[in-house]
Image (cartoon, helix red, strand yellow):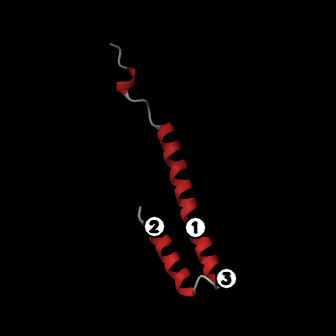
Amino acid sequence: MALTPLVLALVGVAVGLAVAPDVPAGWVVLGVTAAVVGSAILGSAVFLFVDRKRQPPSPVDHEES
């Protein structure tokens, strides 16, 4: 499941190159691929940031010596 964005990116690039980079459809496919990969990265970063904030603090951080 974690490889899904990578697989989509590789398929998008392969299709874009198969259509040929000089054809506008190839650039559209590459643009959509970049958008999918970018949104996946951004979504993952936001999820990890929010998930980090939801977790209770570690007991190690609050030990008194």
Element under disc 1 = helix
**Labels 2, 3: front one:** 3
Q: Is residue 4 above or below residue 65?
A: below
Amino acid type, label 1: Ala
Q: Nearer the viewer, residue 50 or 7?
A: 7
Which is nearer the N-term, disc 2 or disc 3? 2
Q: Is residue 19 above or below residue 56?
A: below
Residue found 41% across the figure and 65% down from its top: 3
Expressed as whole percent of the image width and height from the top left, the position of residue 42 reads 56, 54
Q: Which residue is mark 2?
A: 6
Question: Would you say 51 lies left or right of 27 here?
Answer: left
| Dot 2 and dot 1 residues touching (CB under 8 Å) | no
Expressed as whole percent of the image width and height from the top left, the position of residue 25 reads 64, 83
Residue found 57% across the figure and 66% down from its top: 36
Residue found 55% across the figure and 48% down from its top: 46
Expressed as whole percent of the image width and height from the top left, the position of residue 65 reads 32, 13
Element under disc 2 = helix
Q: Nearer the viewer, residue 39 or 17?
A: 17
Amino acid type, label 3: Pro
Q: Which residue is mark 1?
A: 34
| Dot 2 and dot 3 residues touching (CB under 8 Å) | no
Element under disc 3 = helix
Residue that extends furthest to the front in the rendered view of this protein? 22
Question: Would you say 57 lies left or right of 24 here?
Answer: left
Q: Which residue is mark 3?
A: 24
Q: Estimate how packed mark 3 is, as few (under 14), some (14 to 19) or many (20 or more) residues with alpha carbons within 10 Å.
A: few
Q: Estimate how packed mark 2 is, as few (under 14), some (14 to 19) or many (20 or more) residues with alpha carbons within 10 Å.
A: some
Which is nearer the N-term, disc 1 or disc 3? 3
Per the model, the C-alpha gap separating discs 2 and 1 is 11 Å
Per the model, the C-alpha gap separating discs 1 and 3 is 15 Å
